[in-house]
Amino acid sequence: MIIRIKSVYKTYGGLFFLGLIGIPVGAIIGLIDTIFGTVLLKVTDIRETYPMYLIPFLAVVGVVIAYCYFKFGGKSSKGMNLIFEVGHGEEEIIPLRLVPFIISGTWLTHLFGGSAGREGVAVQIGATFSHWVGKRLPIKNASSIFLVTGMAAGFAGLFETPIAAILFAMEVLVAGSLEYQSLFPAFTASFTASAVSKALGLEKFSFALSSKVVFDLSIFWKLIVLGIIFGMVGGAFAWCLKLSKRKIGNRLKNPMIRIAIIGVCLSVLFLLFYKGRYSGLGTNLIQNSFYGGEIYSFDWLLKFILTILTLSAGFQGGEVTPLFSIGASLGVLLAGFFNLPIELVAALGYASVFGSATNTFFAPVFIGAEVFGYSYLPYFFVVCAISYIFNMDKSIYSLQKISTKQ
Protein backbone atom coordinates (compact mmCIF):
# COMPACT_ATOMS: atom_id res chain seq x y z
CA MET A 1 0.00 0.00 0.00
CA ILE A 2 2.80 2.41 0.93
CA ILE A 3 4.61 1.54 -2.29
CA ARG A 4 1.45 2.26 -4.26
CA ILE A 5 0.97 5.62 -2.52
CA LYS A 6 4.58 6.53 -3.28
CA SER A 7 4.04 5.55 -6.92
CA VAL A 8 0.92 7.72 -7.18
CA TYR A 9 2.72 10.64 -5.53
CA LYS A 10 5.68 10.25 -7.87
CA THR A 11 3.35 10.28 -10.86
CA TYR A 12 0.91 12.99 -9.82
CA GLY A 13 2.58 14.88 -6.97
CA GLY A 14 4.26 17.33 -9.31
CA LEU A 15 1.00 18.09 -11.11
CA PHE A 16 -0.76 18.63 -7.79
CA PHE A 17 1.97 21.07 -6.76
CA LEU A 18 1.68 22.88 -10.10
CA GLY A 19 -2.07 23.08 -9.56
CA LEU A 20 -1.50 24.85 -6.25
CA ILE A 21 0.99 27.22 -7.85
CA GLY A 22 -1.63 27.86 -10.51
CA ILE A 23 -3.79 29.69 -7.96
CA PRO A 24 -1.46 32.68 -7.34
CA VAL A 25 -0.40 32.63 -10.99
CA GLY A 26 -4.05 32.82 -12.05
CA ALA A 27 -4.68 35.63 -9.58
CA ILE A 28 -1.83 37.74 -11.00
CA ILE A 29 -2.91 37.07 -14.58
CA GLY A 30 -6.49 37.94 -13.65
CA LEU A 31 -5.26 41.24 -12.21
CA ILE A 32 -3.25 42.08 -15.34
CA ASP A 33 -6.18 41.08 -17.56
CA THR A 34 -8.47 43.35 -15.56
CA ILE A 35 -6.17 46.34 -15.98
CA PHE A 36 -5.74 45.61 -19.68
CA GLY A 37 -9.44 45.00 -20.30
CA THR A 38 -10.68 47.96 -18.26
CA VAL A 39 -8.35 50.43 -19.97
CA LEU A 40 -9.28 48.94 -23.35
CA LEU A 41 -12.97 49.60 -22.70
CA LYS A 42 -12.16 53.19 -21.65
CA VAL A 43 -10.09 53.62 -24.80
CA THR A 44 -13.03 52.35 -26.84
CA ASP A 45 -15.36 54.87 -25.20
CA ILE A 46 -12.96 57.72 -26.02
CA ARG A 47 -12.69 56.65 -29.67
CA GLU A 48 -16.44 56.31 -30.05
CA THR A 49 -16.87 59.81 -28.60
CA TYR A 50 -14.26 61.46 -30.84
CA PRO A 51 -13.92 59.28 -33.97
CA MET A 52 -13.23 62.17 -36.33
CA TYR A 53 -10.32 63.35 -34.18
CA LEU A 54 -8.66 59.97 -33.65
CA ILE A 55 -9.24 57.64 -36.60
CA PRO A 56 -7.40 59.92 -39.10
CA PHE A 57 -4.18 59.36 -37.12
CA LEU A 58 -4.26 55.54 -37.28
CA ALA A 59 -1.33 55.46 -39.72
CA VAL A 60 0.79 57.73 -37.52
CA VAL A 61 0.32 55.61 -34.42
CA GLY A 62 0.89 52.52 -36.54
CA VAL A 63 4.34 53.78 -37.49
CA VAL A 64 5.10 54.36 -33.79
CA ILE A 65 4.04 50.79 -32.96
CA ALA A 66 6.06 49.30 -35.82
CA TYR A 67 9.15 51.36 -34.97
CA CYS A 68 9.06 50.37 -31.29
CA TYR A 69 8.74 46.69 -32.16
CA PHE A 70 11.50 46.94 -34.77
CA LYS A 71 13.88 48.84 -32.49
CA PHE A 72 13.18 47.32 -29.09
CA GLY A 73 10.81 44.36 -29.49
CA GLY A 74 13.23 41.57 -30.31
CA LYS A 75 11.52 38.18 -30.36
CA SER A 76 8.40 39.66 -28.79
CA SER A 77 7.52 40.99 -32.25
CA LYS A 78 6.55 37.43 -33.19
CA GLY A 79 3.57 37.70 -30.85
CA MET A 80 1.32 34.66 -30.88
CA ASN A 81 3.71 32.79 -33.16
CA LEU A 82 6.32 32.87 -30.40
CA ILE A 83 3.85 31.27 -27.99
CA PHE A 84 3.28 28.45 -30.48
CA GLU A 85 7.02 28.03 -31.12
CA VAL A 86 7.63 27.63 -27.39
CA GLY A 87 4.66 25.28 -27.11
CA HIS A 88 6.13 23.10 -29.86
CA GLY A 89 9.61 23.13 -28.32
CA GLU A 90 11.12 25.24 -31.12
CA GLU A 91 11.92 28.17 -28.80
CA GLU A 92 12.70 28.22 -25.09
CA ILE A 93 12.21 31.80 -23.93
CA ILE A 94 9.31 34.25 -24.06
CA PRO A 95 10.75 37.68 -23.16
CA LEU A 96 8.78 39.48 -20.46
CA ARG A 97 8.90 42.64 -22.57
CA LEU A 98 6.25 41.00 -24.77
CA VAL A 99 3.60 41.94 -22.19
CA PRO A 100 4.03 45.75 -22.13
CA PHE A 101 4.58 45.80 -25.90
CA ILE A 102 1.42 43.88 -26.77
CA ILE A 103 -0.71 45.73 -24.20
CA SER A 104 0.36 49.24 -25.24
CA GLY A 105 0.24 48.37 -28.94
CA THR A 106 -3.30 47.06 -28.59
CA TRP A 107 -4.48 50.09 -26.62
CA LEU A 108 -3.10 52.40 -29.32
CA THR A 109 -4.57 50.32 -32.14
CA HIS A 110 -8.02 50.52 -30.57
CA LEU A 111 -7.79 54.17 -29.56
CA PHE A 112 -7.12 55.22 -33.14
CA GLY A 113 -9.69 52.94 -34.73
CA GLY A 114 -8.06 49.69 -35.82
CA SER A 115 -10.34 46.66 -36.08
CA ALA A 116 -8.81 44.06 -33.79
CA GLY A 117 -9.56 41.92 -30.76
CA ARG A 118 -8.18 41.30 -27.30
CA GLU A 119 -8.18 37.54 -26.64
CA GLY A 120 -4.84 36.95 -28.36
CA VAL A 121 -3.36 39.65 -26.16
CA ALA A 122 -4.73 38.07 -22.98
CA VAL A 123 -3.43 34.65 -24.01
CA GLN A 124 0.02 36.10 -24.66
CA ILE A 125 -0.02 37.90 -21.30
CA GLY A 126 -0.93 34.70 -19.48
CA ALA A 127 1.47 32.48 -21.41
CA THR A 128 4.41 34.86 -20.96
CA PHE A 129 4.06 35.24 -17.21
CA SER A 130 3.10 31.63 -16.48
CA HIS A 131 5.90 30.21 -18.64
CA TRP A 132 8.37 32.50 -16.85
CA VAL A 133 7.18 31.04 -13.53
CA GLY A 134 7.30 27.48 -14.86
CA LYS A 135 10.91 27.86 -15.98
CA ARG A 136 11.84 28.47 -12.34
CA LEU A 137 10.08 25.45 -10.85
CA PRO A 138 12.09 22.27 -10.15
CA ILE A 139 9.54 19.96 -11.78
CA LYS A 140 9.85 18.11 -15.07
CA ASN A 141 7.97 19.78 -17.94
CA ALA A 142 6.81 22.58 -15.62
CA SER A 143 7.47 25.28 -18.21
CA SER A 144 5.50 23.54 -20.98
CA ILE A 145 2.64 22.71 -18.60
CA PHE A 146 2.58 26.27 -17.34
CA LEU A 147 2.57 27.66 -20.87
CA VAL A 148 -0.84 26.03 -21.41
CA THR A 149 -1.85 27.02 -17.87
CA GLY A 150 -1.10 30.66 -18.58
CA MET A 151 -2.92 30.60 -21.91
CA ALA A 152 -6.00 29.29 -20.13
CA ALA A 153 -5.75 31.84 -17.32
CA GLY A 154 -5.28 34.71 -19.77
CA PHE A 155 -8.37 33.71 -21.72
CA ALA A 156 -10.43 33.13 -18.57
CA GLY A 157 -9.37 36.35 -16.90
CA LEU A 158 -10.54 38.44 -19.85
CA PHE A 159 -13.72 36.63 -20.88
CA GLU A 160 -14.66 35.05 -17.52
CA THR A 161 -15.43 31.74 -19.25
CA PRO A 162 -13.04 29.41 -17.39
CA ILE A 163 -14.19 26.08 -18.83
CA ALA A 164 -13.94 27.29 -22.42
CA ALA A 165 -10.56 28.82 -21.55
CA ILE A 166 -9.19 25.53 -20.22
CA LEU A 167 -10.33 23.64 -23.30
CA PHE A 168 -9.07 26.33 -25.68
CA ALA A 169 -5.58 26.28 -24.18
CA MET A 170 -5.48 22.48 -24.16
CA GLU A 171 -6.54 22.04 -27.79
CA VAL A 172 -5.25 25.07 -29.70
CA LEU A 173 -1.54 24.19 -29.97
CA VAL A 174 -2.26 20.92 -31.77
CA ALA A 175 -5.70 20.70 -33.37
CA GLY A 176 -7.39 17.39 -32.62
CA SER A 177 -5.30 16.73 -29.50
CA LEU A 178 -5.64 17.74 -25.85
CA GLU A 179 -2.77 18.59 -23.49
CA TYR A 180 -4.15 16.49 -20.63
CA GLN A 181 -1.14 16.92 -18.34
CA SER A 182 -1.97 20.63 -18.07
CA LEU A 183 -5.58 20.04 -17.00
CA PHE A 184 -5.31 20.53 -13.22
CA PRO A 185 -2.99 23.57 -13.24
CA ALA A 186 -5.07 25.11 -16.04
CA PHE A 187 -8.22 24.44 -14.01
CA THR A 188 -6.99 26.18 -10.87
CA ALA A 189 -5.40 29.08 -12.75
CA SER A 190 -8.41 29.67 -15.01
CA PHE A 191 -11.03 29.66 -12.29
CA THR A 192 -8.83 31.89 -10.13
CA ALA A 193 -8.18 34.37 -12.96
CA SER A 194 -11.88 34.47 -13.80
CA ALA A 195 -12.86 35.00 -10.16
CA VAL A 196 -10.29 37.78 -9.70
CA SER A 197 -11.34 39.72 -12.80
CA LYS A 198 -15.00 39.33 -11.84
CA ALA A 199 -14.32 40.53 -8.28
CA LEU A 200 -12.43 43.54 -9.65
CA GLY A 201 -15.39 44.48 -11.83
CA LEU A 202 -14.18 43.64 -15.33
CA GLU A 203 -17.15 43.78 -17.68
CA LYS A 204 -18.29 40.40 -19.03
CA PHE A 205 -20.64 39.82 -21.94
CA SER A 206 -23.42 37.31 -21.33
CA PHE A 207 -26.91 36.91 -22.72
CA ALA A 208 -29.54 34.49 -21.44
CA LEU A 209 -31.25 32.93 -24.45
CA SER A 210 -34.98 32.54 -23.99
CA SER A 211 -35.93 31.02 -27.34
CA LYS A 212 -38.04 27.88 -27.04
CA VAL A 213 -36.99 25.66 -29.93
CA VAL A 214 -37.75 21.95 -29.86
CA PHE A 215 -34.70 19.90 -30.77
CA ASP A 216 -36.24 17.67 -33.47
CA LEU A 217 -35.20 16.36 -36.89
CA SER A 218 -36.22 19.49 -38.81
CA ILE A 219 -34.19 21.67 -36.45
CA PHE A 220 -31.29 19.23 -36.61
CA TRP A 221 -30.95 19.65 -40.39
CA LYS A 222 -31.09 23.42 -40.08
CA LEU A 223 -28.30 23.29 -37.51
CA ILE A 224 -26.18 21.19 -39.86
CA VAL A 225 -26.56 23.71 -42.70
CA LEU A 226 -25.79 26.58 -40.32
CA GLY A 227 -22.70 24.71 -39.15
CA ILE A 228 -21.52 24.35 -42.74
CA ILE A 229 -21.98 28.07 -43.42
CA PHE A 230 -20.32 29.22 -40.20
CA GLY A 231 -17.51 26.72 -40.69
CA MET A 232 -16.78 27.97 -44.18
CA VAL A 233 -16.86 31.61 -43.05
CA GLY A 234 -14.46 30.94 -40.16
CA GLY A 235 -12.18 28.89 -42.38
CA ALA A 236 -12.27 31.61 -45.03
CA PHE A 237 -11.31 34.23 -42.45
CA ALA A 238 -8.28 32.18 -41.38
CA TRP A 239 -7.27 31.51 -44.99
CA CYS A 240 -7.70 35.15 -46.06
CA LEU A 241 -5.76 36.41 -43.02
CA LYS A 242 -2.81 34.16 -43.81
CA LEU A 243 -2.91 35.05 -47.51
CA SER A 244 -3.23 38.77 -46.81
CA LYS A 245 -0.30 38.80 -44.39
CA ARG A 246 1.88 36.98 -46.90
CA LYS A 247 0.92 39.08 -49.94
CA ILE A 248 1.14 42.42 -48.16
CA GLY A 249 4.37 41.40 -46.42
CA ASN A 250 5.95 40.45 -49.75
CA ARG A 251 4.92 43.69 -51.45
CA LEU A 252 5.68 46.04 -48.54
CA LYS A 253 8.66 44.53 -46.76
CA ASN A 254 9.44 47.53 -44.55
CA PRO A 255 7.06 47.23 -41.57
CA MET A 256 6.85 51.00 -41.03
CA ILE A 257 6.04 51.76 -44.66
CA ARG A 258 3.55 48.88 -44.71
CA ILE A 259 1.64 50.01 -41.64
CA ALA A 260 1.70 53.65 -42.80
CA ILE A 261 0.24 52.97 -46.25
CA ILE A 262 -2.42 50.54 -45.07
CA GLY A 263 -3.13 52.70 -42.03
CA VAL A 264 -4.05 55.64 -44.27
CA CYS A 265 -6.33 53.43 -46.35
CA LEU A 266 -7.96 52.02 -43.22
CA SER A 267 -8.59 55.48 -41.77
CA VAL A 268 -10.46 56.45 -44.93
CA LEU A 269 -12.46 53.22 -44.95
CA PHE A 270 -13.36 53.36 -41.25
CA LEU A 271 -14.62 56.93 -41.56
CA LEU A 272 -16.38 56.23 -44.85
CA PHE A 273 -18.26 53.27 -43.38
CA TYR A 274 -20.44 54.95 -40.74
CA LYS A 275 -17.67 56.86 -38.92
CA GLY A 276 -16.00 53.97 -37.14
CA ARG A 277 -18.81 51.41 -36.96
CA TYR A 278 -16.27 48.70 -37.83
CA SER A 279 -13.43 49.98 -35.66
CA GLY A 280 -12.38 48.26 -32.46
CA LEU A 281 -13.58 45.00 -31.02
CA GLY A 282 -16.95 44.75 -32.71
CA THR A 283 -18.83 44.74 -29.42
CA ASN A 284 -21.25 47.26 -30.93
CA LEU A 285 -22.26 44.67 -33.53
CA ILE A 286 -22.56 42.01 -30.83
CA GLN A 287 -24.79 44.24 -28.71
CA ASN A 288 -26.96 45.11 -31.71
CA SER A 289 -27.26 41.43 -32.63
CA PHE A 290 -28.71 40.45 -29.26
CA TYR A 291 -30.51 43.58 -28.11
CA GLY A 292 -32.46 44.56 -31.19
CA GLY A 293 -30.10 47.15 -32.62
CA GLU A 294 -29.64 47.73 -36.33
CA ILE A 295 -27.64 45.09 -38.18
CA TYR A 296 -26.97 45.57 -41.88
CA SER A 297 -26.68 42.61 -44.23
CA PHE A 298 -23.07 43.59 -44.99
CA ASP A 299 -21.92 44.18 -41.38
CA TRP A 300 -20.29 40.77 -41.02
CA LEU A 301 -18.46 41.09 -44.35
CA LEU A 302 -17.06 44.57 -43.72
CA LYS A 303 -15.91 43.57 -40.23
CA PHE A 304 -14.33 40.47 -41.81
CA ILE A 305 -12.38 42.50 -44.40
CA LEU A 306 -11.33 45.41 -42.18
CA THR A 307 -10.10 43.13 -39.38
CA ILE A 308 -7.94 41.21 -41.84
CA LEU A 309 -6.47 44.43 -43.22
CA THR A 310 -5.81 45.82 -39.73
CA LEU A 311 -3.93 42.74 -38.58
CA SER A 312 -2.11 42.26 -41.91
CA ALA A 313 -0.79 45.81 -41.69
CA GLY A 314 0.90 45.07 -38.36
CA PHE A 315 -1.48 46.65 -35.87
CA GLN A 316 -1.80 44.87 -32.53
CA GLY A 317 -4.69 42.94 -31.02
CA GLY A 318 -6.40 39.60 -31.27
CA GLU A 319 -8.94 38.14 -33.65
CA VAL A 320 -11.48 36.44 -31.41
CA THR A 321 -13.85 39.28 -30.45
CA PRO A 322 -14.11 40.42 -34.09
CA LEU A 323 -14.87 36.79 -34.94
CA PHE A 324 -17.62 36.81 -32.32
CA SER A 325 -19.08 39.91 -33.96
CA ILE A 326 -18.78 38.47 -37.47
CA GLY A 327 -20.56 35.29 -36.40
CA ALA A 328 -23.28 37.07 -34.45
CA SER A 329 -24.11 39.60 -37.18
CA LEU A 330 -24.07 36.87 -39.83
CA GLY A 331 -26.39 34.85 -37.60
CA VAL A 332 -28.88 37.74 -37.53
CA LEU A 333 -28.87 37.72 -41.34
CA LEU A 334 -29.33 33.94 -41.59
CA ALA A 335 -32.05 33.62 -38.95
CA GLY A 336 -34.80 34.74 -41.32
CA PHE A 337 -33.78 32.26 -44.00
CA PHE A 338 -34.00 29.36 -41.55
CA ASN A 339 -37.08 30.61 -39.71
CA LEU A 340 -35.27 30.42 -36.38
CA PRO A 341 -35.07 32.96 -33.51
CA ILE A 342 -32.58 35.71 -34.26
CA GLU A 343 -30.81 35.55 -30.90
CA LEU A 344 -30.36 31.77 -31.16
CA VAL A 345 -28.75 31.86 -34.61
CA ALA A 346 -26.65 34.87 -33.59
CA ALA A 347 -25.40 32.91 -30.57
CA LEU A 348 -24.60 29.88 -32.72
CA GLY A 349 -22.66 32.09 -35.13
CA TYR A 350 -20.89 33.82 -32.23
CA ALA A 351 -19.47 30.52 -30.99
CA SER A 352 -18.98 28.51 -34.17
CA VAL A 353 -17.24 31.12 -36.34
CA PHE A 354 -14.74 31.54 -33.51
CA GLY A 355 -14.28 27.77 -33.35
CA SER A 356 -13.87 27.27 -37.08
CA ALA A 357 -11.40 30.16 -37.42
CA THR A 358 -9.26 28.88 -34.53
CA ASN A 359 -9.70 25.23 -35.60
CA THR A 360 -10.94 24.24 -32.15
CA PHE A 361 -14.01 22.24 -31.19
CA PHE A 362 -14.54 21.95 -27.44
CA ALA A 363 -13.77 25.60 -26.63
CA PRO A 364 -16.52 27.11 -28.83
CA VAL A 365 -19.09 24.60 -27.57
CA PHE A 366 -18.46 25.65 -23.99
CA ILE A 367 -18.04 29.34 -24.68
CA GLY A 368 -21.52 29.16 -26.15
CA ALA A 369 -22.79 27.39 -23.05
CA GLU A 370 -21.01 29.72 -20.60
CA VAL A 371 -22.13 32.90 -22.35
CA PHE A 372 -25.65 31.94 -23.45
CA GLY A 373 -26.73 29.13 -21.13
CA TYR A 374 -26.04 25.42 -20.68
CA SER A 375 -29.56 24.43 -21.72
CA TYR A 376 -28.52 25.23 -25.30
CA LEU A 377 -25.39 23.10 -25.19
CA PRO A 378 -26.81 20.46 -27.64
CA TYR A 379 -27.36 23.19 -30.25
CA PHE A 380 -23.82 24.51 -29.84
CA PHE A 381 -22.44 20.97 -29.96
CA VAL A 382 -24.06 20.18 -33.32
CA VAL A 383 -23.26 23.48 -35.03
CA CYS A 384 -19.69 23.68 -33.69
CA ALA A 385 -19.01 20.06 -34.65
CA ILE A 386 -20.15 20.66 -38.22
CA SER A 387 -18.30 23.98 -38.50
CA TYR A 388 -15.15 22.27 -37.19
CA ILE A 389 -15.44 19.67 -39.95
CA PHE A 390 -16.09 22.22 -42.70
CA ASN A 391 -13.40 24.78 -41.84
CA MET A 392 -10.93 22.93 -44.08
CA ASP A 393 -8.38 22.68 -41.23
CA LYS A 394 -7.65 26.39 -41.52
CA SER A 395 -6.61 28.39 -38.47
CA ILE A 396 -5.82 32.01 -37.66
CA TYR A 397 -2.80 30.57 -35.83
CA SER A 398 -0.39 29.81 -38.64
CA LEU A 399 1.86 27.63 -36.47
CA GLN A 400 -0.94 25.45 -35.13
CA LYS A 401 -0.20 21.79 -35.81
CA ILE A 402 -2.73 19.14 -36.84
CA SER A 403 -2.85 15.91 -34.87
CA THR A 404 -2.27 12.77 -36.91
CA LYS A 405 -4.79 11.01 -34.64
CA GLN A 406 -7.76 12.99 -35.98
Image: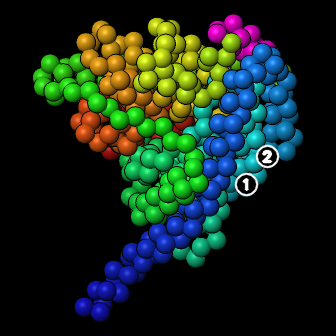
> In the picture, residue 24 is in which quadrant?
bottom right
Q: Are marks 2 and 1 in contact (CB under 8 Å)?
A: yes
Which of 393/316 is in front?
A: 316
302 horizontally vs 79: left or right? left
Q: Which mark is residue 95?
A: 1
261 horizontally vs 355: left or right? right
Which of 210/376 is in front?
A: 210
| Residue at point 32%, 39% (across, down) | 373
Q: Determine if residue 252 is in view.
A: no
The amino acid type, in three-letter code, at marker 1 is Pro
347 horizontally vs 172: left or right? left
Q: Which mark is residue 8?
A: none
Q: Position of residue 292 (x, y in %)?
A: 43, 18
Which of 134/140 is in front?
A: 134
Label 2 CA crowd tier, 10 Å (few <14, some 14–19, many 20+): few
Q: Determine if residue 283 is in view.
A: yes
Chain part drawn in magenta: 264-274
> In the picture, residue 47 is in which quadrant?
top right
Q: Is residue 221 magenta?
A: no
| Residue at point 56%, 18% (across, down) | 303
Label 1 CA crowd tier, 10 Å (few <14, some 14–19, many 20+): some
Q: Which mark is residue 74?
A: 2
Q: Position of residue 208 (x, y in %)?
A: 35, 35
Q: Main secondary structure of the magenta part?
A: helix
SS class, disc 2 = helix
SS class, disc 1 = loop
Q: Position of residue 148 (x, y in %)?
A: 51, 55
| Residue at point 48%, 13% (across, down) | 295
